[in-house]
Amino acid sequence: MPGDLDTIAGSQGLVPLGHAAPEAGLPAGTGHLVLLGPDGGAFWAVFRASPEYGDGAPDPLDRWSSRVLGGIADRLGGVALLPFGGPPWHPFIAWALATGRCFPSPVGLLVHDRFGLMVSFRGAIALPGPPPPQPDGASPCESCTDKPCLVACPPRAMTGAGYDVAACHDFIDTTAGADCLSGCLVRRACPVGQGLRPEAQSAFHMAAFHRSRP
């Protein structure tokens, strides 16, 4: 099953980010969950070639995720679970922590052992059977002496004290904040996962985030 999963997910530019034991309330027959996220530039190429990216309708990435995760789940005999479309909302942060490959970072965001602060989840697949053996994970932050994420945000909107979302949006609206639209400087400062997300992909997410300002 893991080999099939890797191949099927990889064909869509996705990569397994970790497996977790099931939680209450999951589909009957669930043995474990696998979280799936973008596999760097491979994902961006697949998504840009998709009908959702070019059709001009709202929420192209969510619609792509619904279609692709649903297709992967069908091929593997599982059920797709998505981080949007609630309520109710699935506990993706708790699931990510349960994989042993994601950890709290000094700025509060999740950090992944391979993708660093650039980790993101397009969804999860609930599968039958027990989870495969997992590598012993360790937070990359433990060996990071400089912790550049703590000082990367120019307006200090995201620090160890928390995240001031309004201050983040306000700064992005200024000339000095233009570089943030190429990708959050805090996420980009993480030494883990450097080069695993194209700038255009980060800019796409930042534009969507900034449009969502209340």
Image (spheres, helix red, strand yellow):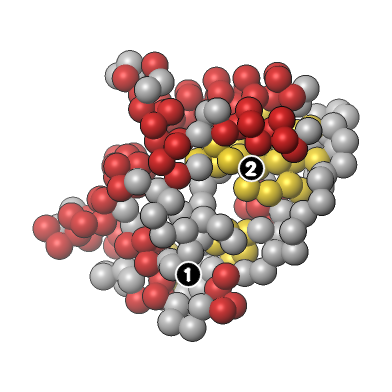
Above or below, 141 relative to 164: below
Give neighbour class at mark 1: few <14, some 14-19, many 20+ (Cα, 10 Å).
many
Of residue 87 and residue 176, the one placed in the foreground of this image is 176
Q: What's the CA distance linking mark 2 and mark 1?
A: 24 Å
* Residue 161 visible somewhere in the drawing: no
Residue 139 figure quarter = bottom right
Label 2 or label 1, whichever lies nearer to me, is: 2
- Which amino acid, by three-letter code, is at mark 1? Val
Residue topped by disc 1 = 107
Residue at 48% x, 24% y is: 64
Residue that lies at the very extreme toward the bottom in this rendered image: 145
For the point 75% across and 38% down, the residue is: 2
Closest to the observer: 25 or 192? Answer: 192
Local secondary structure at mark 1 = loop
Look at label 2 and name its amino acid.
Answer: Pro
Q: Which mark is residue 179?
A: none
- Relative horizontal placement of residue 176, taking residue 186 as reference (left or right): left
| Residue 6 appears in the figure | yes
Q: Residues within 10 Å of mark 2 (few under 14, many from 20)?
A: some
> Could you tell me which secondary element the residue under label 2 belongs to?
strand
Q: Are marks 2 and 1 in contact (CB under 8 Å)?
A: no
Q: Residue 28's x, y, as percent?
A: 86, 28
Q: Quarter holding the C terminus?
A: top left
Residue 14, percent from left and from top: 55, 36
Image position, residue 37 (x, y; %):
55, 41
Please tell me which of labels 2 and 1 falls first in the chain: 2
Seen as rendered, the residue at the extreme left is: 175
What residue would you read off at disc 2? Answer: 16
Relative to 132, residue 165 above or below: below
